[in-house]
Amino acid sequence: MNRAATISIAFAAAGAVIAPFMLKPFGIFLISMWAVLTIAAIGLNLTLGYAGQVSMAQGAFVGIGAYTLALLTQAGVPYPIAFAASGILCFIIGWGLGYPALRVQHHYLAFVTLAFTTIVFLLLRNEEWLTGGIYGVNAIARPVFFGWSTGKAMDYYFFCLGVLTVIAFAVWWMLRSPWGRAFVALRENPVRALSLGLDTRRYTLMAFAIGSSLGGFAGALFASLVQFIEPASFALNRSFDLLLMVIVGGSGYFMGPFVGALVAVLLPEWMRVTEGYYLIIYAALIMVMMPLAPYGIVGLIERGYKALTVKRKPPAPMLTPERTAP
C-alpha cells in the first residue's frame, strides 16, 4: 500500500469516527446503513471481485442473517450467539450454493443465484408460521455489552463501525495470505490455476461461503438497525443494489465496497431534492460513469494517481561521451 493510499484511509477512518457528532439522527441512521451495507458488499467483492464468481444472491444472505438474528433473539437466545449463528448459517448455505459454480460460470451462474434469491424471498413471504410473512418481525433488540447499551443511534453506529473494522481487517489479512492469491488466480484463469496444483474446487466453495457469511453478519446488523424486517427488504433489488456498490466502487479493489456503499446510500438521499426525478438522474449518472470508469471509482482514482506519478518523474539522464566509460 503506497503512502497516498495510507493517508487517504487514515483520513477516511477519522471522518467515520467524527461524522456522527456532526449529524442529526437521520444522518446517523444513514451512515449506520453505510457501515452495514459495506460489510455485505465486502463479502460480494470477495466472491465476485477476487474469486470471479458472479453471485446475485448476496441480498438473500442479508435476509437470512436478518431473520436468523431476529427470530433467535425473540426466542431468548443471547445476542452474541444469535449474531454468530447468522454468519454460520449463511456460511453453510453459501457453501452449498457454491456447488453450481463448479459446473457453470459467468451469466449462467448469475441465473442460478438469481433463482436462489427468488426462492428465499418466496419462503420469507409465504412461511408465516416462521417468518411472519408480509407482517414481518418487529421489536428487534439491540445488543448490550457489559452494561453498554447500543439502543441509541450513535451507540449503535459505533457498534456497527467496530464490527466493520474487525471484518475489514480480517479480509485485508486474508487477501494478503495464500488464500487471497488463490482467489485471484481462480478469477484470472481457473484452468491455469488447476494445472499449477491449486484446488479450485475448494477455493470456489470457500469464496462463496465466506462472502455469504459476511452477508449474514450484515443482515444481523441490519435487523437491529431498522428493528423491523419484512420480505420486501430482501427481494432482488437488494442484490442488485449490492452488485451496484461493488461495481461502482471498484470490483477487485479492497476499498471498492466502502466507496460504492457510500455512493449508493448517500447519493439517492442527496438527489431527493429533485423530487420525482431523482431516480432518473441517479440512473443516468451510473450509466455515464460505467463507460468512463469501467474499473469503478477506486480504479479511476488509482489510474489517475499512477498517470500523475509517471508524468512527474524526471526523464532518465542520457549518457554523453564524457560520461561514457572508456
Image: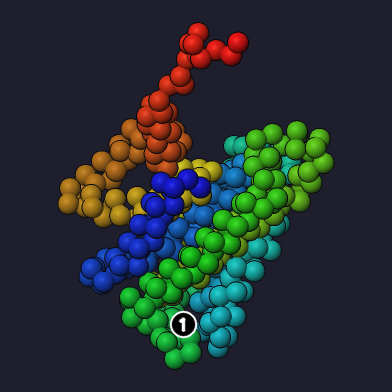
Q: Callout 1: few (<14), some (14-19), or many (20+) C-alpha neighbours within 10 Å?
A: some
Which quadrant is the C terminus positioned in?
Answer: top right
Does any portion of residue 265 appear in the rendered image? yes
How far from the left and from the top, in percent, is residue 105?
A: 66, 38
Number of callouts:
1
Residue 10 at what x, y percent from top left? 39, 58
**Amino acid residing under circle 1:** Pro
Residue shown at the point (40%, 25%) measured from the top left: 314
Give the x, y percent position of residue 205. Answer: 71, 52
Which residue is more in the foreground, 104 or 189?
189
Depicted 229 relative to depicted 145: above or below: above
Above/below status of 312 relative to 86: above
Q: Is residue 112 visible?
A: no
Residue pictured at 60% horizontal, 74% vertical: 84
> Of all residues shown, which one is farthest toward the top?
321
- Image quarter of residue 197: top right
For the point 42% across and 42% down, which residue is it?
A: 298
**Viewer-side residue, 49 vs 89:** 49
**View extreme (bottom): residue:** 147
Q: Nearer the viewer, residue 230 or 248?
A: 248
Looking at the image, residue 197 sits to the left or right of residue 60; the answer is right
Q: How is the image coloured?
A: rainbow
Q: Is residue 243 left or right of residue 213?
A: left
Name the residue that disc number 1 marks: 143
Whole-percent x, y for residue 56 in the image: 55, 48
Question: Looking at the rendering, which quadrant does residue 189 occupy?
Answer: top right
Left/right of residue 31 with respect to residue 61 in the rendered view: left
Q: Residue at x 52, y 55 (%)?
A: 42
Helix, strand or loop for disc 1: loop
